[in-house]
Image: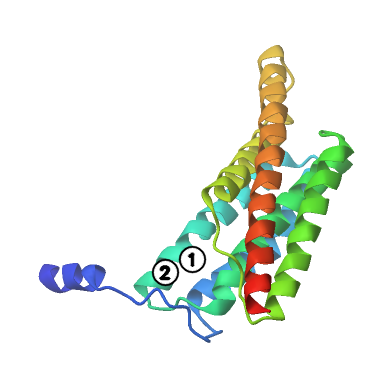
Amino acid sequence: MKFKLNEKFRKKYSPEARDIYFTVPNLISLLRIISIPIIAVLVSRHQMIEALAVLAVSSVSDGVDGVLARLLNQVSKVGQILDPIADRLLIFCSILALGVAGIIPWWMLIIVGLRDLLMGLEVLALAQYDYGPLPVNFVGKSGTAMLMISITALIFCDIWNNPLVDLLHLAALAAGIWGVGLYWLAGGIYLRQGIRLIREAR
């Protein structure tokens, strides 16, 4: 029995994305997207404990869907699109909610929104030449991680009010600014890659 289980987990699944839609990983990704407005509403109402609980479940599901996609051999093109959409929606909606709650300045929302709008236009342009989403690079992953750390810390800081938490709040804002910088740097890399692909296709 143990040998069979080991063989199952050692089995190499194809990394090629397929045209399949109704899969367990895609369902998890869809539920994660549905949870985003719930998180945003809770944050905007300063219901931070509840927001952190939903955010924690959403974050765990982000890793689970990728693992299941490989274990169940359900890597799909739809899943490769849903995952980055969920990440960007979570960041944008969380920053919007933090702005509504008066926790962060509105310029952060505007800068992040402009970057995501630019990337959305690039995806549409690439789709005209039958290109899917560009592979995520290290800078993009770092920027997303930094922003998520900042967002989580800012939500956490709103629960209490003391000098130590105030320092953490400043650190979280600083991390958010760095995250926005990396987010835009990654956007520049994606933009250059997209322009090169479109030129080659022409």
Secondary structure under the numbered disc 1 in the rendered image: helix
Could you tell me which quadrant the N terminus lies in?
bottom left
Task: Please provide percent x and percent y for residue 71.
Answer: 35, 71
> What residue is pinned by disc 2?
68
Query: Can residue 97 be seen here?
Result: no
Residues 164 and 180: in front is 180
Q: Amino acid at mark 2?
A: Leu
Q: Amino acid at mark 1?
A: Asp
Query: Could you tell me how far apart the alpha carbons at marks 2 and 1 are, in whole angstroms?
Result: 5 Å
Label 2 environment density (alpha carbons within 10 Å; few <14, some 14–19, many ≥20): some
Task: Please provide percent x and percent y for residue 87.
Answer: 64, 57
> What residue is pinned by disc 1?
65
User: Is residue 7 shown above or below 156?
Assistant: below
Residues 82 and 62: in front is 82
Label 1 environment density (alpha carbons within 10 Å; few <14, some 14–19, many ≥20): many
Task: Please provide percent x and percent y for residue 29.
Answer: 58, 68
Residues 121 and 21: in front is 121
Number of numbered tags placed on the structure image: 2
Residues 195 and 132: in front is 195
What's the residue at 37%, 76% (across, down)?
A: 72
User: Is residue 166 shown above or below 116?
Assistant: above
Q: Are marks 2 and 1 in contact (CB under 8 Å)?
A: yes
What's the residue at 64%, 49% (across, down)?
A: 186
